[in-house]
């Protein structure tokens, strides 16, 4: 069997949203269409299925038996992260970033919970005239995550929220969070 590093890409934009490795050739990448070990990848694939699509598989590298497949996978993950790709890999730890004041709207209006964030996301998405489906695909999050955020549901995934806010050049500033306000 061929050892490969592969990417799962959005069928609409071509953006890479997941990097994986396989010692079984295309068997492992193809399994993502039916099941995934990552909840984030599963949500994304399920949202594509709702639109009668599936991720595109891109082979990034064939890995020889002499090479360490784990280090080659890490190389590709870091490469795409450095290119600002929004990866859904569960092994990634995304820190909460302090905004560089590029977009002060979220910080200056003291964040009074999920309602403020929901309104911000919905207004910004509409301002750029993009549908929820298009935006979710570009942000690399499941459509259900975006819908929950825009509806002010409090049981949203923080990683999904951060991916969406980054699309607007915004982040949550930890210095503005106190014990009275929870996301």
Image (cartoon, helix red, strand yellow):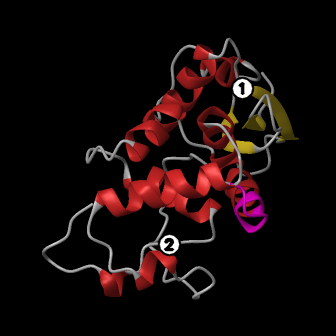
Q: Is residue 85 above or below residue 137?
A: below
For disc 1, the marked residue is: 55
Q: Position of residue 64 (x, y in %)?
A: 84, 41
Seen at 13% across and 74% down, the residue is 180
Q: Is residue 99 above or below residue 30?
A: below
Along the viewing direction, whichever of 135 and 9 lies nearer the viewer: 135
Boundaries of the magenta span: 79-85
| Element at label 1 | loop
Q: Position of residue 121 (x, y in %)?
A: 50, 56
Instruction: Tell which residue pokes out farthest to the left in this image.
Output: 180
> Is 81 contained in the magenta span?
yes
The 10 Å Cα crowd at callout 1, few under 14, some 14 to 19, many 20 or more, is: many
Seen at 70% across and 45% down, the residue is 138
| Element at label 2 | loop
Q: Is residue 39 above or below residue 24?
A: below
- Kindly identify which numbered label has been placed on residue 179: none
Q: Position of residue 54 (x, y in %)?
A: 70, 19
Res 100 seen here? yes
Q: CA distance from mark 2 to mark 1?
A: 28 Å
The 10 Å Cα crowd at callout 2, few under 14, some 14 to 19, many 20 or more, is: many
Instruction: Indicate the quadrant where residue 75 lies.
Output: bottom right
Seen at 71% across and 53% down, the residue is 128
For disc 2, the marked residue is: 171
């Amino acid at each position: 069997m061929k050892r490969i590093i592969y990417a799962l890409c959005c069928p609409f934009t071509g953006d890479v949203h997941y990097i994986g490795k396989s010692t079984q050739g295309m068997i492992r990448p193809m399994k993502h269409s039916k099941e995934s070990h990552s909840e984030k990848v599963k949500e994304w694939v399920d949202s594509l299925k709702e639109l009668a699509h599936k991720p595109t598989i891109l082979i990034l590298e064939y890995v020889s038996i002499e090479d360490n497949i784990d280090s080659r996978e890490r190389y590709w993950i870091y490469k795409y992260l450095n290119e600002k790709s929004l990866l859904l890999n569960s092994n990634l730890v995304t820190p909460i970033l302090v905004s560089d004041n590029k977009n002060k709207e979220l910080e200056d209006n003291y964040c009074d919970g999920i309602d403020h964030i929901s309104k911000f996301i919905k207004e910004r998405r509409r301002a750029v005239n993009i549908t929820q489906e298009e935006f979710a695909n570009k942000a690399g999050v499941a459509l259900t995550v975006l819908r929950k955020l825009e509806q002010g549901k409090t049981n949203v995934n923080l990683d999904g929220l951060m991916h969406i806010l980054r699309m607007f050049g915004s982040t949550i500033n930890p210095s503005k969070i106190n014990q009275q306000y929870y996301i």
